[in-house]
Image (cartoon, rainbow, N blue to C red):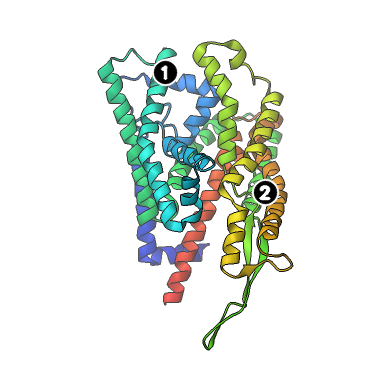
Amino acid sequence: MFNKIGQIIQTKELRNKILFVLGILAVFRLMANLPIPGIDVSKIQQFFSSNEFFGMLNLFTGGALDQVSIVMLGLGPYITATIILQLLTMIFPQLEKMYKEEGEDGRRKFNQYARIATPFFAAFQSYAMLIFLKSQGLIANMGSFELVTSILAITGGTVVLMWLGELISEKGIGNGVSLLIFAGIVADIPSNIQQAILTYDPAQLISYLSFIIASVLIIGAVVLVNEGRRNVPVSYAKRIRGNKMYGGVSTYLPMSLNPSGVIPIIFAISLVMLPSMVGTFLHIDFLTNMFSNSWVYGLTYFILVFIFTFVYTAITFDPKNISSNLQKMGGFIPGVRPGKPTEEYIQSILNKLLIIGATFLGAVAITPLIIEGVTGIQQFSFMIGGTALLIIVSVVLDTMKQINSQLEMREYND
């Protein structure tokens, strides 16, 4: 590890990229603490701490939401736009062709559509959030001018944040959007550690030790499943052109245990929290208390994560397209005929992997409930379960891989 750190410091290009990323993250944290004018932040923070849904949203913005800052929505509108466009590929064939068949150019156009749609989603979400906070008596009455300027400020903050993410991806290292979400999540860790230390009770020593052991085991399991692959062997037929022979090599098709990432958890938690949010907004006690029972909440949450894992994978992973591409390039799976049999074989492997991946994803999603119930410790439970943990692990692993690849390229060049 120390050898790698030394290599990073000595490599000027890589060092500058990392410093650039850290600078962008510092700008993000500064923006997260710039509230829009005319807001009583203390009332809003008290409300968010007592509401599970908004507390979760606040977690992913690094506290920017309960500060009602200019980046209070984080990258939520951009992620929403991207997810909706991906869902629309199931309805519009042209959009599906662009996303799945046109390669890098198609993905670039698809991402451009998501960027164009982001300001509209940001304006709508900021308006809805301000009206909701107003209905709860958390912000003073706003005139038309104040409301419009606040919406423009929040929308502008979201667009700037999206631009900063693009800058990280282009000039820094790692995925910019993922790193900004990661920064928002880990921003609250120091305050949670401080709170746990201040409220420490020696009588809870066994609970704290159990929590630490569970943390290590769960994080290890997340890394294992996140990196887990099923390598499907692929061979290419030999072709002779002139005096040269092409093909005749063997490789493999990597299939991940968790191809859908954290999206199923985001879908599931949004759906589970929707009745509570609507009930709070409309003052309907039945909806507000629908999932007040932790067993009902946990079971519903697990089932939704399991289902959405299959649904989202069906959108993003197309065995038919993979089978067609293999056939076009002269590739085949040994013992399986090209075409429809290859498609069915890949689909059968995918279904088996998804059963494992979806079960694990659902288990990780409800881990905070289990940890909190067993240990009684609430300060750290979000850190070892759910979307937060998967994002942290995924971003750290991806960034480490990119740093290692940069170092390896330097060694080859030398």
Q: Circle 1 sits on which residue? A: 133
Q: Residue 65: horizontal and vertical position, in percent?
A: 42, 29
Instruction: Name the residue type under label 2.
Output: Ala
Disc 1 secondary structure class:
helix
For discs 1 and 2, the disc positioned in front in the rendered view:
1
Placement of the C terminus among the 4 image quadrants:
bottom left
Residue 298 drawn above or below residue 314: above
Residue beneath label 2, please? 221
Tell which of 306 and 402 is nearer to you: 306
Q: What amino acid is labelled 1 in the image?
A: Leu
Task: Report the side of 170 relative to 182 (left or right).
Answer: left
- Count of numbered marks: 2
Indicate whether 353 appears above or below 305: below
Q: Where is residue 232 in the image (x, y as percent from the top left)?
A: 67, 63
SS at mark 2 in the image: helix
For the point 54% across and 44% down, the residue is 391
Q: Position of residue 370 (x, y in %)?
A: 69, 32
Looking at the image, which residue is at 52% across and 39% down?
A: 91
* Residue 237 image-quadrant placement: bottom right
CA distance separating discs 1 and 2: 39 Å
User: In the figure, is residue 358 to the left or right of 414?
Assistant: right
Answer with mark 1 or mark 2, whichever residue precedes in sequence. 1
